[in-house]
Each structure stands twice: as C-alpha cells, then as structure tokens.
Image: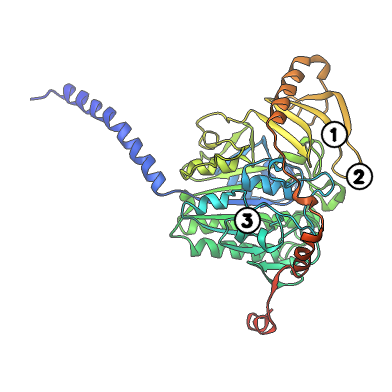
Amino acid sequence: MIHASASRRVGFLLALLCCPLVAAAADEEKKADPPNIVILFADDLGYGDLGCFGHPTIATPNLDRMAREGLRLTQFYVAECVCTPSRAALLTGRLPIRNGMCSDTKRVLFTDSLGGLPEGEITIADTLKGKGYATACVGKWHLGHLPQFLPTRQGFDSYYGIPYSNDMKPTVLLRGATVIEDPADQTTLTKRYTAEAVSFIRQNRDQPFFLYMPHNFPHVPLFASDDFKDKSLRGLYGGVVEELDWSVGQVLDTLRELELDKKTLVFFTSDNGPWLIKNRNGGSAGLLRGGKGSTWEGGMREPTIAWWPGTIPAGGVSRELGCTTDLLATISALVDAPLPDDRVLDSYDLGPVLLGKGESPRKSMLYYRGRKLMAARLGPWKAHFMTQAGYRQANPEVHDPPLLFHLEHDPSEKYNVAKDHPDVIADIRKLVSEHEANLNAPPSQMEIRQTGSTRASANRGSRRFTRRTSSERAARGK
C-alpha cells in the first residue's frame, strides 16, 4: 500500500515527466494548425493620429480596443519614408536598396514607370502560399502596375484595388489585372475594400489564409463616405481615419464571429509618416520630428498594434525595436516556413516580443532616403549623417560630425549631444561601414528608361490593363 505522501510524490514526478511531452504536443498542434495572418497597412498615417497613440480628437475606438486586447509597439519602423520602397521592404524582408525598389530621382513608381518588384524577390505571400495558404491583396499595391508586376504575379491568389497612389491618373480600380472602374469612386473605396476583405475571410474560414490589406488612405486626396465625411472633430482628415478605424473593426468582428480570432495574427501599421506639407489634409507625428519623405523619426516610426487573442498578452506596450522588414522572419517562424538562404535579408523574428517572452533581436536601424543612407540607430542612439525635410528642400544637409540624439531621452530629436559621445559615433560608423561593405545594390527599378528594347513594353503598358467589354460592364452594372 502506498502512503498518501508517497502517492503525491509519484504524481508530482509523473507530472514533471509529462510536461515536456505536453509542451511538445502543443508545439506540434500549433505547427499543424498554423495561424491566419492579416496585415492592415495605412497610407501616410502619422505616429500621433490614433487615439491609443495620443490624438485628442480623432476617435479610433476599434484600434483602441485592438490595442487593449493586444500589443502596442512604440518603437516600430518602416524601412523607407515613402510609399513604394516601404511596401517593397515589408513584403520581401529586405531593404529597398537590396531589391532595387528605391531611387534618388523618382522616389516612387508612377503611372508611366516601367519597373516594379523584381520577379526573383520572395514575398510573404510567396512564403505562405508555399505552406498552403489562400492569399489575397486588397487595396493599394504601388509595386508596379504592368501585368508582370501585379500582386497575382507576386504570390497572391487574388487582387482588388488601385495599383498605385490615389492621386495618380488614371485612378483605376482593378480586379486581378482587369479594370472594373475608371475612375474609381474613392468616396466608397474604404467600404468596398472592407467588404472584399470580409468576403475573403468568410470564403477561406476553413483553411489558413493571408490577407494583405494596404489602404489608399489617409493619403491625399482625402475621401470618406457620407457616414464619416462630416462627423469627426478633426475635420475631413479625421473622418478618413475614423472610417479606416471602422474598417479595422469590421475585420476583427468578422474574425470574432467566425471564431477565428484566436487563430489569427493581425498586424496594423502605416507605410510612412504624415504628409506634413498638406497642412490640415495631412496628419500628425505627435511628439516626433518630421514626417513623410524625411528620415527624422516622424517619417519612419509608425503607430503599430499586434493582435492575437490568447497568444499575444492583452494590454501590453513594447518599447523594443522592430521594423516592417521583420514581418517576413516573424511570420515564417510562426508557420514553420524556411527563410530564403540565397540572399541577404534584413529580417528578424519578433516572436519573443509579440509573445511577451523576450527582447527583440533587432538592435539597430538604418534610415535610407532613396539610395542614400541618411542616418543609423544603434540601441537608443541615432546619428544623422545627412538631414533633409520631406519635401521642398532640394538637397540634403551634410553633418560632419553627425548629429547625435538619444531617442529614449529625446524622441523629438531636439538635443544634439554629439560632442559628448564621440565613442557612440564611432560605434555607429562601424555599424554603417560593416553594412556598406556587404551591400550589393542592384539598379533602381524606378529609373528604368525607354530604350529600343523597352519601347515596345512601354507601348503595351500604355494599354496597361485589361478592360471589361461593354457587355461585361452592363452585366455587372458598371
């Protein structure tokens, strides 16, 4: 007969032996049932434009709830300060200088551009599609409008959206590579993007899916539906942001309704900082200096929220460094997908940060403006080798010695402390030298010019997209 105390000891020992088995079983179950992935990407939204990031009059109840139920990341960056290169970096996990999606002369792709994201780049969509995911892009693409560069050639099963910025002509709405509206009615664009996203989630509820939803707003020109246009204390800009917040709520509510919320990682951020020269039609970087087009903090540090109920601890705030390029490595680790080993990646797995289990492996940031490395951050220290306002400043101002700011003491970059810390500047110079020594920058995709070999492509590109026939338009009511 076993005494009670001995029985308890045996039970305790059995429990200890079983713990690794239970943990291993949980890990295997997670791999067998990988999470859905949703990336919500605003356009020109400033660090200070959300209620949960300090805006006093823009109402963002859905994003505020998302933050309460998830994790706010307060030191999270994009890899470039304007649209095209920022988007290329997010999808490929690579600095734009490595994939050719940046330029000093043409900051973004335009409707007459002949280049785009190279076919050889491996996107998050490619990675997830290889793991059996359904993939969709809903919204602004801006990585090449010619057929060979559209989302359906970059790992996405479907595409619905405007292929570039909403101020470029012709402002066409595409489904796949087919124009379904010209010009697009932008007053209902956010609502239609939302309906498309919700439909995709519903259709793929029984399999893993990846939804990349890059909005066209609050990039100018600003448009909002009648439900939001004249309702915000912040005016039209506030109404546009509040409609984006509504859209986020619709996506999250759909996940809750379908009981997919605990199976889905949702990531919200913006492609670059606010377009300050647009005055009241532009946003706010809060306490950060500068905005869109600059490598001051306001141009590249973004309001960011990660949400995954039951996995990401609720109500957290992370001050760890992160960047949109890190999404590739983070997502690949979550779904047990290999990272490409035939190229240099600028991507770190932020899993420990999201799960509240550790520090970020990212310890530095490189701030590019086009093909120029303007600044670098190492730990809390940021050195500016050159500075340039987002717009209306023709040439950068060179700083030798560089300006130096301690971003955790001085996030507004007001107090240059370079003379007191030559050792820090030396460390940052070493970081930059090591980066540049291993940099193999391809030609810019934005600078492809018409030559004899490209003129035919340009002529084909003048037609650009397949258009519906009159009978198709009549059948669809367009």
Distance between the Cα atoms at labels 3 and 2?
A: 31 Å
Front-lying residue, 110 or 113? 113
Check disc 2 and report its element: helix, strand or loop: loop
Local packing at callout 3 (Cα closer than 10 Å; few below 14, some 14-19, many 20+) is many
Front-lying residue, 355 or 209? 209
The C terminus lies in quadrant = bottom right
The quadrant holding residue 169 is bottom right
Left/right placement of residue 48 relative to residue 398 reads left
Image location of residue 251, percent across then percent down: 57, 57
Farthest residue, direction front: 452
Task: Name the residue that disc number 3 marks.
Answer: 213
- What residue lies at 67% left-to-right and 44% top-to-bottom? 89
Front-lying residue, 120 or 106? 120
Image location of residue 141, percent across then percent down: 68, 57
Image location of residue 211, percent across then percent down: 57, 56
- What residue lies at 55% left-to-right and 65% top-to-bottom? 199
Q: Mark 3 or mark 2: name the one nearer the start of the chain.
A: 3
